[in-house]
Amino acid sequence: MGTSLYPGRNKWKKINLQRGVLGQRRQICAAQNDITLSVFTVTSKSMTVQWSSYTGASSYKITATPKNTPGQPVFAHFSGNVVTGSVISLSPNTMYTMQLEAMDNALNVLSSADTEDTTAPEVPSIEQAYSKNSDSITVEFTEVSGATSYILRAQTESGDYFSEMVVVSSPGTVVKLKPYTDYRLSVMSVNSGGRSQPSYPIEARTVVMAPQLNTTSPNNASIVVTWPPVENAVLYMLCIIQEGSSSRVKLNTTDTTVNFNDLAAGTTYCIKGTAWDSEGRAGDDLTVCQITRPPSPDVTLVQVSPGRSIGIAVYWVLVQGAENYLVWTSNGQHCNSTADGYCSIVPVECGQNHSVSVTAYNKAGPSSPSQPADYITYPCPPENIRVEEPEAGNCSVVWDSVPMVEYYMAFIKRDDGTEMSCNTTETTCQFSCMCGYTYLTSVFPYNKAGSSPFADVSNYTTIPCCPQGVTIQLVSTETLEINWLPVKGAELYQTMAAQTNDVIHCNDTAPVCALSDLKCDTAYSVTVTPCSELRGCNHTCTPHTQKTAPCAPEILNMTQSNNSTYRIHITMPNTPNTNYTIKATGRFATHTCQTTNSSCELTQLPCGSSYDVIAVAITTVGRSLPGFSKTLETGPCCPTYVNVTQVTQAMTNVTWSPGSSARSYVTSLTSPRGHAKCHTLDTHCLMGCITCGTDYSVHLEAISSTGHKSECKYYGFSSGACCPTSMKLYRMRSYSLRVSWRSLGPQTHNHTVDLYGTGANYTCTAAAGSKHCDIEERTCGDVYKVVAAPVGQDGIKVSFCQPRTYSIPCPGNNAGMLISRGKRSVD
């Protein structure tokens, strides 16, 4: 008969084996079908298996056979619609072979499968359970054969707590429980097959918690212990023991406060507290340690320490149990110390009479203060130390009185190292003082504690003397440099330069001063006054007179006297008889001129040059600054040559060389019969309207880019003789040709006539005054180009006369026919 699944089993074992195949786990599958068998869960005396359904099976048979031990098989039958079943009455901790057989109605085996597993060990039994701590219960139980571990189960009656814990042997402890709580406890054995059924349960209760002890030490002979009430506790037991001692004192109480008195000061005590419940069971215990407050220390010495900052050193006897010490003075100052038996308070006030106490501290708190010890400090240094000089050379150190002083020591030290001192019970001390020195004074008061370790130092400087070796030097036109020997006691020098309506000041600590921004060409009265911060200035020093450099002249205008001379006009801002130098600086040369008046001339200035012109005034005192410069530009240079070439009878071509600094040129040819002019940027010009046979004067004007002009004159030019006009060619007789013309102007030139024909060329010459020329022709009926030109005095024929072309027939027709004429200017 079948049984239901075991609800606590959470492990499935499912292994498929085909026929003839062995796996790591032993299983068998039916060959006819894939029927499978696996162990679902085990107990000590049962094993539950599950299988896959087999088609056609009307029932199933499960057989459990011990494998390694003798024993009878146990079997169970299940209907065909069941796939899970249990076999009971098995032996604990035994390996079984589980065989499944699927059968039909005739009980024939249709398919089979098997598997192996072990039953759980026997169920152990609990011998006893007890609680020694409020959060755990210890369980002692019998150990069973085959168990590899055990499971302790704890749960409350109400079910609000459930816990299982694995242990390897007895006894085992269940932890994390609540204090004074009832628990039901059971144990299960475990092996590789599974766990056994729980043992018969037993009930146990945890003990109460330990009291949470709080301790304080209100004084050095007692400890107070308090704790909050422990739930379910009816009695408390306290045990106190002194550290380093074997004696102890026990105390039972139902209160929550206990005082332990008559204890040793500065000593540690350990106190153990235990709570008991109504059943007489002791709960948890808790031990705390508390030290009593230390005893009061005794002050042995209070010493005023020397140094610039006054302090006291306090010494005392170290006491038992003290961790640190606090020293307080009656005026509220304090210091701390740990292991040392002294500490220092720095600074303390001077001139005081106070007391000091020492308190020892540990974790419990402070001890009672020690008996106060009195002390006195050094007197305070006097204030308002000053030097009074009622009359020159007779000085006194004066200071304010201070309390707790027996006498004073005054020290006076001069800045050259001389020292003086006086001992007095008064508040003044006289000494002899000299002018120009600084005196350092200090006063030390004394009492039984000694002298004040420091004193204020007062400075007193007598009035400084007038400086010697004053020199005044003009370092620039309007600046004076004054030097002098350093003066004893002077901290500052006031230098003043004064004239009628102007005063210039200079303050400096060095024996040198520069007075600037003075007026030029002016006499100043210069005074050097030494000063000290405390005594003021010595205004009895003698002044010195110094004149400044002359004022700078300015250039008014510049006029040109000739091509190379320019007159410079300047202002005269200085006193009469001042010398002025005017300098023109060019690229290659410098030109100067001097004057005591308002102008002077610069000569031999080359053309085409540019100069920076400045003017400077010079006196016995020095030179002025140069005035503002002005640019002087000389006229451009004339070309070195001019060539005039006649192109035609009425037109010439003028060429010239470039002129330095010239940008444009105006060229003109002038005669009584007329003139021609040309303005150009080039170095050549084509000019018309020229009259033939006329003498011309040649002029050229060179102009710079700034408009400066230079007039240039050259040798004259004579235009060529006039070409003849009204020229005719005609036949005189059979083979004689005549060329006739009309001349312009006087007949002072010979003429040359050239005939250029297609068959022959002919030339004839006519004397001065003649107006025709005859030629013997060899052939007739030719066309001629005829040129008639005058011949100059140098024998050179004028080249610009134009040709004419004529056709001359053979004899029988006297006149020639003019075919064409060349271009000409004048007929």
Image (tube, rainbow, N blue to C red):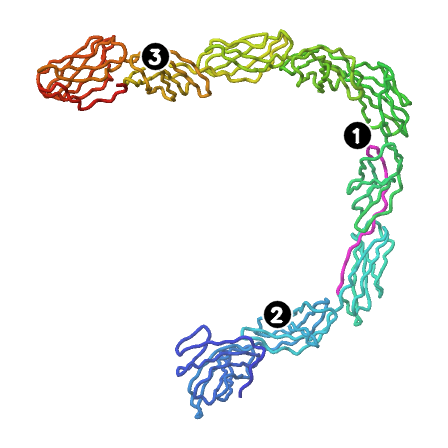
Give the SS element for disc 2: strand
Residue 104 rendering spot, x and y as whole percentages: 44, 90
**Residue at the spot of label 1:** 308
Kindly report which numbered mark, 1 or 2, lies closer to the viewer in this rendering.
Answer: 1
**What residue range appears in magenta?**
284-311
Q: Is residue 332 magenta?
A: no
Tell me the crowding category of disc 2: few under 14, some 14 to 19, or many 20 or more residues within 10 angstroms, Cα based. some
Residue 53 rendering spot, x and y as whole percentages: 46, 84
Query: Which quadrant would residue 660 be assigned to in this image?
Result: top left
What's under tag 2, amino acid-wise? Val
Give the SS element for disc 3: strand
Could you say which disc has been placed on residue 696 in the image? Answer: 3
Kindly report which numbered mark, 1 or 3, lies closer to the viewer in this rendering.
Answer: 3
| Depth order, front residue of 60/276 | 60
What's under tag 3, amino acid-wise? Tyr
| Depth order, front residue of 242/20 | 20
Give the SS element for disc 1: loop
N-terminal of the pair, mark 1 or mark 2, is: 2
